Amino acid sequence: MALSPILFRGVFLLLARFELVVVFRQLAGFALLAALAAPAAVRAGAQATAPPANAATPAKTDVTDEVGRRVSIPVPVRRIVSLAPNLTETIYALGAQDRLVGVTDYCDYPPEAQQKARVGGAVNPNLEQIVALKPDLVLAQAFTLNRRETVDALERLGVAVYSANAHSVDGILDSTRHLAEVIGAVEQSTVLLKNLRTRLGELKRHLAGRPPKRVLFVVWSDPLVTVGRQTFIADALRLAGAESVVETEQDWPRLSLEEVVRLQPDFLVFASSHSKTVRTTVEDLSQRPGWRGLDAVRNRRIAVISDAINRPAPRLVEALEDLARQLHPDAFEEKSKNRKAKIENRKNAAASGESPIFSFLFSLFAFHRVAP
Amino acid sequence: MQPLTPKRLAWICGSLAAVLLIVVIVSLKVGAVPISVIDLVSSLGRVAIGRSAQLPSEYSLIVFEIRLPRILLGILVGAALSVAGAGFQALLRNPLADPYVLGVSSGAALGAIISLIVASRASFAMPLAAFAGALATIAGVYFLGRRGGQLDSHILLLAGIITASFLSALIMFLMTTLSGGELRGIAFWLMGDLTSTKTPVGLGWLFTVLLLAIGAIYTTAADLNLLLSGEQEAMHLGVDVPRVKLVVYVSASLLTGLAVSVSGAIGYVGLLVPHVMRLLFGSDHRLLIPTTALGGAITIVVADTLARTIVSPTELPVGAMTAMAGAPVFIYLLRRRLQ
């Protein structure tokens, strides 16, 4: 009988495990709201000419963030704390890393980001550590990774928090643009976005007229979890010439193996920068009953791409190109070797650190990992 | 056992209050951001003489806006859960009774979750719904635990355990089917979380309810002592047993609902603290109720301070700390007493 509290606790730990896979649970309503409201508002905010910085009364500009919150942000933004690995990546991509003064325990890309001051996990960051870093602006991923409670608490402490929110590849590009406007890195973002849009356009040209491959994107193999229709990953799959065999409203549906056997996807897609880990996983799975009955496993039609696909940040485009090449090799045959080598280099650069997909999933359970 | 005199009561409670004060001051000092004793004392001193405006803003923000609200919440939750545990243990004459074991915490959590789904805008609805959930659960468990018109404490405990798992399953069901972004926060809250600086209603109100409920249980303390020898016996000695039961059940449910609505389900406190206090000071409820309240407050503040410092800046859930730190202390005290 004394066991009961433990059992009860066990249920919550189970819940927690369920939470593990709910990394980027997206709210369709917010997406719509953000898509409609944010661009206009940010533009309005950015246009509001800021008076020259003045020691006595620091200039502020009012901005509506991507979940519709009004945020008063100091101009210029000198000190930034990022509460999500994807936002840390975006800041680096915008070349604003010198202004980044705090990151989470899970901001592992680029590797230099790990040298920044830590503020704890993404789900339960340490509020006093954030306040002590005296940030002009805190960036949160709303509310798929960071919690609304954290944003509320920081707001009450008088810290400006900008919540980013993206549900598609286009959404990620827009979000990057908004972020650039808010922190004052518009020039860099113009170059970055032009590059990304060109690459996406090129990809589209290559894949034109090819029927999409039916894939199963494996977020987690035990239990089997895949992506729902409204996630940015599902959108990225579409752009890479693939379609998920599972089309659900739920963002991170748990799937029975039986269903996968019935659907017989053309390809299984795994994401990790550590291809060795994935290879072991795939070897393991191909021995198991159920999995070994899958055509994709028998014929070794398994695509392994960078874990960048799990993070709504500019680097996602790279993973997406890689996936398209693996799924539709014939579409890229005329590609120059030069370009391929470049991709290889980039992939190698990305393949550092220990299995970022898992550590990122674990970021929901900050307390599972002891900070160094 | 020493007889309980007002002097002894005051002395013991005073010492525990002093321990609590020391614990609070230490907890205000330590954290991810180091604050020196001098800074802390000077800022506390300035606040005490009403010159808080002159504080360096960063320290005052961390000490008074982040650490202090959390400590106050810890005191509230610790006292509430511990006294609720002591109340249930006395009524059921079973040392294993506790808001967790009886399913009352799950009932409160389910009530709170339903209120969040149905009326997420009405913030005051959550503690009320948690209270209603707790009360409905204890009523159900009490009804299930009766055999031949008499309360059978073994059946009652079994009923509580089954109810707890049933309610947890309902919570799981709601969490899985309703995949709103808000529910992600709930999962975290369910694991026991003191980090939220926002309470559904003001801290002042919560403390008022806490003191009223503990006070209500305290008025029955003498009767609870007599109840220890059995309901029939207590009745013969002139105790109004139904009234005592009603007061304690309602108050203990209120305390559980209160604690769960602000911090989620933090386990082991309701079981552990009354036991430790009984081992230290004896089982007279007139002494046990106030010492349990103070002891619970000390326990949670210590546990939460450890939770936010040992792997700083990463934070542990306070529930894990109460379980990890509480169990060994409990076993030590138990064995020492057996010798």
Image: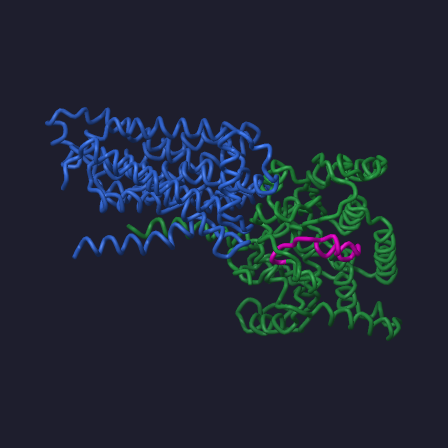
Q: Position of residue A28 (x, y in %)?
A: 68, 41
State the quadrant of the C terminus of chain B. bottom left
Q: Position of residue A152 (x, y in %)?
A: 61, 38
Q: Which residues are magenta?
A: A88-106
Q: A356 or A279: nearer the eye?
A: A356
Q: A3 or A146: nearer the eye?
A: A146
Q: Is residue B6 left or right of residue A19?
A: left
Residue visible at 14% across and 27% down in the picture: B235
Residue visible at 21% across and 31% down in the picture: B6
Q: B166 or A293: nearer the eye?
A: B166
> Does residue A37 appear in the picture of this structure?
no
State the quadrant of the N terminus of chain B. top left
- Position above or below: B13 against A221: above
Q: A222 or B248: nearer the eye?
A: B248
> Does residue A128 appear in the picture of this structure?
yes
* Tally of numbered tags: 0
User: Is residue A104 on the magenta stretch?
Assistant: yes
Task: Give the image's coloring scheme.
Answer: by chain
Residue visible at 77% across and 62% down in the picture: A318
Q: Position of residue A159 (x, y in %)?
A: 66, 40
Q: Is residue A78 left or right of residue B164?
A: right
Residue visible at 82% across and 74% down in the picture: A341
User: Is residue B312 on the magenta stretch?
Assistant: no
Q: Is residue A366 left or right of residue A135?
A: left
Q: Is residue A40 left or right of residue B278?
A: right
Q: Position of residue A104 (x, y in %)?
A: 62, 55
- Position above or below: B220 against A308: above
Q: Which chain is blue?
A: B
Q: Which chain is green?
A: A
